Amino acid sequence: MAPSAAAVRELIWFFNEAESAIEDSSNFCPLVAGSTATTADEEEARREAVHAVGKINGWLSKVHTTEALLLAGLFTDRPWPKRVRRALGVLGGAVAVLPVVRAEHLSAFATGRTRSDKVPDWLEELLAGRGRDSVAAWKRDAARSCAIAIAAYERARGKCPCIAPEKEEEDR
């Protein structure tokens, strides 16, 4: 079963945009300029974002911690090394947070089998060498685990409409 558009939109927003949506803007520059720090519309948008963050966080707290970490890995936008992006596609972040992958990386780093202190760089090393089979197996595990995690999130959120704030169209 594919995830609902509402769940996907919420998780993308939560892991990539929510923090900046709920930040209070600085009031120093407007104060010097003699205006208010925020408009009523900006304050209302911030309050709606705070509400959405609370709801989504509540739903995420109802899923297992490992599933929430997988969702964060899956939906957080990050730059990936080209070889990792090609091999893992959208599952790159999920593979990188799999407990088995993190443990294998830590073991490789601790025993000197890699000098990469970051999982994505280590995955790139593996893909360039003899670790392609392991990475392919982890990709299959991540796909299966992500399907379970998304289903758990869908159950937690129920049938409500998407609560992620709409992106504002900027005047050009």
Image (cartoon, rainbow, N blue to C red):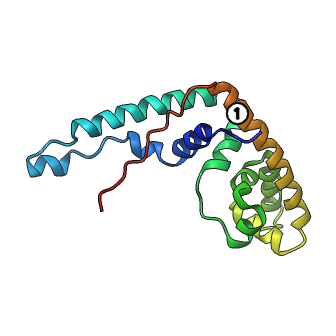
Q: Is residue 2 left or right of residue 161?
A: right
Residue 66 seen in this snapshot: no
Residue in front for this viewpoint, 68 or 103: 68
The answer to which image quadrant residue 166 occupies is top left
What quarter of the picture does the C terminus occupy? bottom left
Q: Residue 148 at x, y = what percent?
A: 78, 37
Q: Position of residue 126 (x, y in %)?
A: 82, 68
Residue at the spot 54% in from the left edge and 30% down from the top edge: 161
Establish if 82 lies above or below 33: below
- Quadrant showing the N terminus: top right
Picture layout, residue 1 above or below residue 79: above
Q: On screen, 129 above or below 143? A: below
Check disc 1: other Cα within 10 Å, few if <14, some if 14-19, many if 20+: few
Residue 41 rendering spot, x and y as whole percentages: 26, 38
With 15 as the anchor, is 101 left or right in this view?
right
Q: Residue at x 37, y 48 (%)?
A: 168
Under mark 1, the amino acid is Thr
Q: Which residue matches tag 1?
A: 65
Secondary-structure class at tag 1: helix
Relative to 69, is 32 above or below? below
Q: Nearer the viewer, residue 68 or 151?
A: 151
Number of numbered markers = 1
